Each structure stands twice: as C-alpha cells, then as structure tokens.
C-alpha cells in the first residue's frame, strides 16, 4: 500500500510540474531533439550523456518517475545514475515548458564481476612487478597484496601490472585481491612474496624451442615452445610429450642454483594436460639434482593447476627437475616454474660427527667426537657397506654367548644448558635385535636418565628413526655436559647386527 502511495505521489509530482510549467509559459518552447546517447548499456552509478539540440530549455529530468539532477554542458546533458538504480530498462524523461516532454529508453546492467585468469610470476620480492590478466578489470578501486595496497603501474579492462609492496612477509602464500566497482577477485593459484631462485622460470626467454637457463636432459625432441592461445599460460610456455617408458625419459631441468642445506624450499609449477590426449588424467613427478629427492606422482587435469612440492635442501646447490615421461603420448603445457626458500635451517646440532663421515673405516676404537664402543662380546666398526645418508655409518655386532644389553655403548659427550629442552634424532637399521634403548646419561646414579624407545623392535632391516625430547639436567654432573649412549638386546642365541647413522641433538624449536 505504501509503495503504491509513493508511486501515485511521484506521478502527481510530475503532472504538477508539467501543469505549473505549462501555466507559467506564454511562449512555445523550441523543440528538443535527442540526437544520441553515449552508450546502449549503463552501470548503476555511471553517467548517462545525451547529445542533442535545445537542451537549454530542459527544466527537469526523470528516471522512470524519480526526479534526478542533471548538468548542461553546451549540447550535452549529463545525468548520473544512482548506485541503487534498478537493473533493466529505464525511461529517461526530459521535461520542458508547456507540458512538453521527450523520452528515451536506456538499459541499466549489472556491473561485471572481475575475473583473474593468470598471474605471472608466481613469486616476486618487494618492489617486483606482477602482471594479471582477465576480464572486467576496469573500474579499478584497488589492488592489495597481503592486505597492503599495491601501486598500479598500468591498468586496462584485461590486464593489470602492479608493484609488490615492500616489507611483506616472505615465503608464505600471500593474499592478492583486485577490487573493482563490480566486486573483488583473487587468483586461483597461490602467490608468494619472495625471490624465484630459478632464472627464466616464466620461460619467456629463449629462441625456437630452447629455453634460456633450462636443459632437456632426456627426450629433447618431445619438448617444444608454444605461444598458442589456450595452450600458453602467459606469453610463452613449454609443451611436453610423455615418452611412456619412465618418468625421467621426458625431463626438463633448471640450471643449478645455490641452496642452504637443511632449509625448506617450495617448488611451484603451473601445468595442464592437453584435451583429447592422455595428458588429461596423466601423472608427472618432480625431483632434484644432485643428491636426488623425489616427489610423489601428481595427477594432471585439463585445466591449469598449480602443483606444489616442499623439500629440505640436501646440497649447497640444487637443480629443479620435471619428470614428465611416465605416460606415453601425454601432452602437457607447463609454465611459471618457481623455486623459493620458505624456511630456515634448524639450529645446528650440539653433538659432533653424528654422521660418522669424519671417521676412518675400520675398528671404532677412536671415533672422532665419540668416547668409544664397549664390547667384550661385541664389536663395532666404521663401515661404508650401508648408511642412511652419506657414505658411512657405525656397524655393531652383538654376539649371543654371554652378551649383555650394555655390551655395546657408543657414547658422545655434548655440552648442554641446564633446563634447556633438546631433541635427539638417530637412525637405526638392524636384524636379529629384539629391542634397542636410547638414553641420555646426565650423571645420575646409575647414570641412565631416561629410555627413549625401550620397546623398539628391529626385524625389518629397514632404516628407522628414533626421536627423543629431553630437558637437560646437570645437577649430578660437574662438567655441564650430557652423554648419548645406547644398549640393545639380541634375539635368542643368534645375536644381531645393527647400523647407526645421522645422530643429531638440537635445541628444540
């Protein structure tokens, strides 16, 4: 009822205005002519510009039955649509003297929602530039990265170039928001603040089918460059065909880049399979060189997706390797390959020579950094016949006759801080050993503070990690140190063999 009353009231207002105007004008007004309207469609809040003749005689303007202000500029009338203007066909009315009106229909449409199709590169440091492409990126309000407004270098309805603000946290996914009058949009893939360690990770540089700073170690003829629309993600991309015998048969490899041993890194890759080929539903993997690490298999779809692999660097220099050859005839498109550091190395170990690499092969009577090996009925030696990492480990053999669990006790003395929490990690591989006990000796009576893994069984002959957290207590020691030691039990009367490697004691994070 109230709505109807408002409409009647507005109609009466328009009639009254026309009536008053017609009663107060004695002369016939010149004819108003609308020659053109600037556009066929308008967004709420946008200006409607009409060109024509005799607009100086216009007294009032209406959108449907709502009076709105106007501006007269020569042969143009400018009317601003309210932000609340309903979507659909709207009647625009010009009211002159003597009840004379001219009308025109305009179409009010919803502002298009922005869509981001690509973002390149996937990582950039503060001060670096990032390019986004998409649709409806005009009418830009702001671009924020990590909640901080970014400066816009250039802007159009299909492309934005922005500068990453300084001071943002590096090495983590960072929110990227483009705000326009039509809404807000973010990229579908993650963006990281930080330096991409891989040169030419966007694959834009190179001639023919070659890519600067990248090599084709296997299946070179199966890897080509493409700039075709729908195939390339941004500019220039790699097109790779699976060899079909082994994953490494189609292998794309970066130049070697410096890495920090023990630090965390992420490898990011944008990839999609070519529709109609086994690439859609195919699988690939990543690896590193040297000291190879391997990812699991990634299933590939027909849409661009960002794959992510986290590694802990095991070499002072690393190559990123894409192994694309597992599926015969699979066609993949690859772009924006990014390697960046996302974590720092753990604190250094407080013990010495836990890898045993600084020890001579043979009898272990005097191992660097260690106190020795007990064993009237046992023997221990530095060996290169097996190891968890590197080339060497300690091999310990316990004999069945007259053996005691403590007959083999390699010990390593380390300085500790009273009350500080530490983490011990050590790797064992054995057979014929029913259990092994890891202990921290801190000077108590009888000297064994706690057992780390009293029920650990070693029958599979696989490398197993034992970890143990302890709080240092130097109450019963005069030297302010602690000692690592192990003891083990054999199975029946057959004795056993166990290898030990990569023992590290660190301040707990």
Image (cartoon, rainbow, N blue to C red):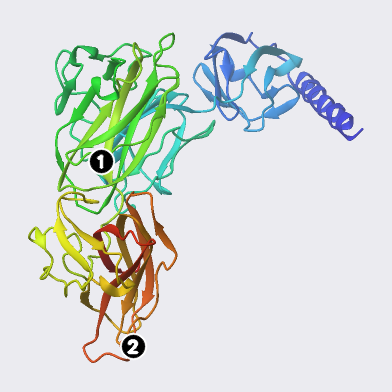
Pointer 2 with pointer 1, Cβ within 8 A: no
Q: Is residue 34 above or below residue 343?
A: above
Which one is in front in this view, the residue at disc 2 or the one at disc 1?
A: 2
Q: Is residue 48 above or below residue 430?
A: above
- Name the image quarter holding residue 121: top left
Q: Is residue 475 left or right of residue 359?
A: right
**Residue 271: x %, y % from top left:** 36, 24
Q: Residue at x 92, y 32 (%)?
A: 1
The quarter of the rendered structure image containing the C terminus is bottom left
- Name the image quarter holding residue 302: top left
Q: Residue at x 7, y 60 (%)?
A: 360
93 or 454, nearer to the observer:
454
Q: Earlier in the sequence, mark 2 or mark 1?
A: 1
**Residue 168: x %, y % from top left:** 33, 52
Mark 2 Cα shell of 10 Å, populated few (<14), some (14-19), many (≥20): few
Check residue 444 in the rendering and tell me which mark sits there, or answer none: 2
Residue 499 visible in the shown view: yes
Q: Is residue 118 above or below residue 124?
A: above
**Residue 402: x %, y % from top left:** 30, 72
Q: Which residue is under mark 1?
A: 128
Q: Residue at x 14, y 59 (%)?
A: 382
Q: Is residue 62 left or right of residue 121?
A: right
- Name the image quarter holding residue 365: bottom left
Disc 1 on helix, strand or loop? loop
- Give the CA distance from mark 2 to mark 1: 58 Å
Q: Is residue 78 above or below residue 293?
A: above
Disc 2 on helix, strand or loop? loop
């Amino acid at each position: 009822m109230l709505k109807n009353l408002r409409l009647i009231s507005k109609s009466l207002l328009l009639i009254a205005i026309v009536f008053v105007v017609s009663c107060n004008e004695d002369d016939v007004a010149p004819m108003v002519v609308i020659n053109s309207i600037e556009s066929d469609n308008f967004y709420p809040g946008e200006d409607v510009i009409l060109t024509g003749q005799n607009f100086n005689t216009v007294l009032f303007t209406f959108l449907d039955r709502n009076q709105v202000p106007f501006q007269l500029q020569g042969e143009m009338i400018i009317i601003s649509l309210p932000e609340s203007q309903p979507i659909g066909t709207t009647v625009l009315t010009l009211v002159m003297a003597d009840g004379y009106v001219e009308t025109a229909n305009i179409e009010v449409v919803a502002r298009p929602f922005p869509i981001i199709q690509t973002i390149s590169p996937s990582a950039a440091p503060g001060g670096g530039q990032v390019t986004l492409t998409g649709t409806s990126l005009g009418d830009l309000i702001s671009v924020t990265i990590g909640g901080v407004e970014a400066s816009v270098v250039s802007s159009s309805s299909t492309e934005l170039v922005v500068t990453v603000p300084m001071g943002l946290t590096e090495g983590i996914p960072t929110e990227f928001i483009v705000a326009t009058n039509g809404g807000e949009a973010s990229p579908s893939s993650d963006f990281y603040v930080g330096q991409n360690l891989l040169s030419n990770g966007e694959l834009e540089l190179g001639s023919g089918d070659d890519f600067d700073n990248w090599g084709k170690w296997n299946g070179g003829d199966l890897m080509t460059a493409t700039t075709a629309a729908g195939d390339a993600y941004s500019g220039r991309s790699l097109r790779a065909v699976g060899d079909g015998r082994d994953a490494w048969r189609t292998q794309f490899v970066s130049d070697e880049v410096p890495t920090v041993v023990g630090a965390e890194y992420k490898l990011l890759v944008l990839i999609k399979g070519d529709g109609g080929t086994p690439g859609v539903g195919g699988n690939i993997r990543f690896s590193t060189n040297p000291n190879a690490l391997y990812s699991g298999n990634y299933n590939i779809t027909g849409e661009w997706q960002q794959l992510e692999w986290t590694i802990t660097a095991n070499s002072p220099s690393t190559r990123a390797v894409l192994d694309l050859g597992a599926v015969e005839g699979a066609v993949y498109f690859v772009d924006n390959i990014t390697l960046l550091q996302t974590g720092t190395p753990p604190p250094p170990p407080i013990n010495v020579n836990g890898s045993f690499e600084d020890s001579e092969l043979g009898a272990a009577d005097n191992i660097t950094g260690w106190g020795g090996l007990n064993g009237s009925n046992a023997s221990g030696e530095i060996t290169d016949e097996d190891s968890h990492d590197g080339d060497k480990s300690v091999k310990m053999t316990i004999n069945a006759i007259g053996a005691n669990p403590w007959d083999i006790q390699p010990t390593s003395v380390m300085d500790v801080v009273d009350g500080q929490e530490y983490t011990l990690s050590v790797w064992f591989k054995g057979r014929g050993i029913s259990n092994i006990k890891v202990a921290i000796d801190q000077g108590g009576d009888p000297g064994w503070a706690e057992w780390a893994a009293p029920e650990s069984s070693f029958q599979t002959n696989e490398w197993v990690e034992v970890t143990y957290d302890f709080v240092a207590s130097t109450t019963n020691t005069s030297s302010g140190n602690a000692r690592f030691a192990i003891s083990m039990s054999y199975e029946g009367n057959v004795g056993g063999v166990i290898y030990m490697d990569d023992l590290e004691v660190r301040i707990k994070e």
